[in-house]
Image: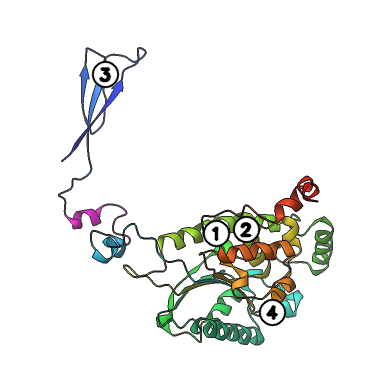
Amino acid sequence: MSIAIATLPLSASQPKHLKIKSNPISKYSKTNKTYFVLIQCCHNQTESIDSLNNNNGHARFPEKNPLINPLVASTIGAVPPRPRRIILVRHGESEGNVDESVYTRVPDPKIGLTNKGKVQAEECGLRIKNMIEKDGDENWQLYFYVSPYRRTLETLQSLARPFERSRIAGFREEPRIREQDFGNFQNRELMKVEKAQRNLYGRFFYRFPNGESAADVYDRITGFRETLRADINIGRYQPPGEKNFDVNLVIVSHGLTLRVFLMRWYKWTVEQFEGLNNFGNGGELVMEKGYGGRYSLLMHHDEQELREFGLTDEMLIDQEWHKIARPAELNYDCPMVNSFFPHLHEETS
C-alpha cells in the first residue's frame, strides 16, 4: 500500500489542542507547528482486476476497460475515425401539419404522423440506404439520435425499416433536440397573432408566451452539440478495438431545431439563420466528411439545393472551405469578415 505525505500548517488562531479527526494517520511537529498527514491510497498496483471493477464507476463499461479488454489497450492514444456523415432528418407529415386545430386538444409531444408521413419516413430511409451503399464499404452502420416527440419516434421507426439489425449500431432518445416549445394547449386565433408578432419582432429572438424562442432552442442545442462532439471524439459508435470508417449518424428532429443545429455547428449569424427555409417533411440534409475531415453540406448537395435552403454566397464559400479543411483549423479568409466589418470592405475597394 502506497503512502502520500501532505503538510497542513497550523495558524496562530487555531488552538494547539486541535486534533484532526479523519481516517489518515497524522503527526504534529512541535518545531514548525505543522501536521504531517499520511494519506493512504485507495488501492495499490497489485490489486486484482476484480477489485478494480468493484470500485465505484469502474464496472459501468467493462468492455472499454483496457485492463480487461486487450483490444482496447492496443488502441489507447489512437484517435477513432469520425463518422462519415451526420444526416439531419425532419419528421414526416404529422397530424398537426395537416390540421392545426389538433394543437388545441392534443399535447404537442403526443401528435403523431399521418399515413403519408410514415410513407415519407420510409422513403427517406431508402434514400439514406442507397446513399450509403454507394460508398462500397461492407461494414457500414447507423447510429440514431431522436427527439422524444411521438412524430419523431414514429418517423424513426418507419425510417429504420429498410435496415437490418446488424446495420443499427444504436440509438439515443435526446430531449434537447425536441421541437421549439410554443406553449401548452394552443389557441388557434391567439397563435395567429403570436406568429404575426414574431415576424415583426424577429424569428430568432421572439419568445412565445409560456414557450421558447429560437434563441432558447440554440442554448439547448449548444449542449447537445458538445455531447455529440464528445461522442465522436471518444469513438462511442465504435465497438471496442474496432475502427469502422463508415459509421453514419442520423438525427431525427424538427424543422426549426435542425436549422438551429446547423446555425450552431457552422456558426451562422442570426441574420443568416432568419434567411433559412424549412426542408420538407421526411426530407434530409447531409453533412458529409470532406477531404480534410470536417463536415460540409457541399460534399453531398449541389449549390442549387443549398440556395433553395437559404444559403448565401458567403455561406456557400464557407462550405467550400469545409470540404478541404481539417477539424482543428480556422478559416482565416472567412468571407463573412468583410461584410461584418464594413471598414475592411472599404479598404479592399
> What SS does tag 3 mark?
strand
Mark 1 touches mark 3? (CB < 8 Å): no
2 or 4: tag closer to the N-terminus: 4
CA distance separating discs 1 and 3? 49 Å
Residue matched to label 3: 34
Kindly report which numbered mark, 2 or 3, lies closer to the viewer in this rendering. 2
Residue matched to label 2: 264
* Quadrant position of residue 15: top left
Q: Badge 1 local density, few (<14 within 10 Å), some, or many (20+)?
A: some
Q: Which quadrant would the N terminus be assigned to in this image?
A: top left
Q: Is residue 55 magenta?
A: yes
> What SS does tag 4 mark?
helix
The amino acid type, in three-letter code, at marker 3 is Thr
> What SS does tag 1 mark?
helix
The amino acid type, in three-letter code, at marker 1 is Arg
Magenta part of the protein: which range?
A: 47-61
CA distance separating discs 2 and 1? 8 Å
Kindly report which numbered mark, 2 or 4, lies closer to the viewer in this rendering. 2
Mark 2 touches mark 1? (CB < 8 Å): yes
Q: Is residue 6 magenta?
A: no
Residue matched to label 4: 95
2 or 3: tag closer to the N-terminus: 3
Mark 2 touches mark 3? (CB < 8 Å): no
From this view, report whether residue 23 is shown above or below residue 109.
above
Q: Badge 4 local density, few (<14 within 10 Å), some, or many (20+)?
A: some
Residue matched to label 1: 225
The amino acid type, in three-letter code, at marker 4 is Glu
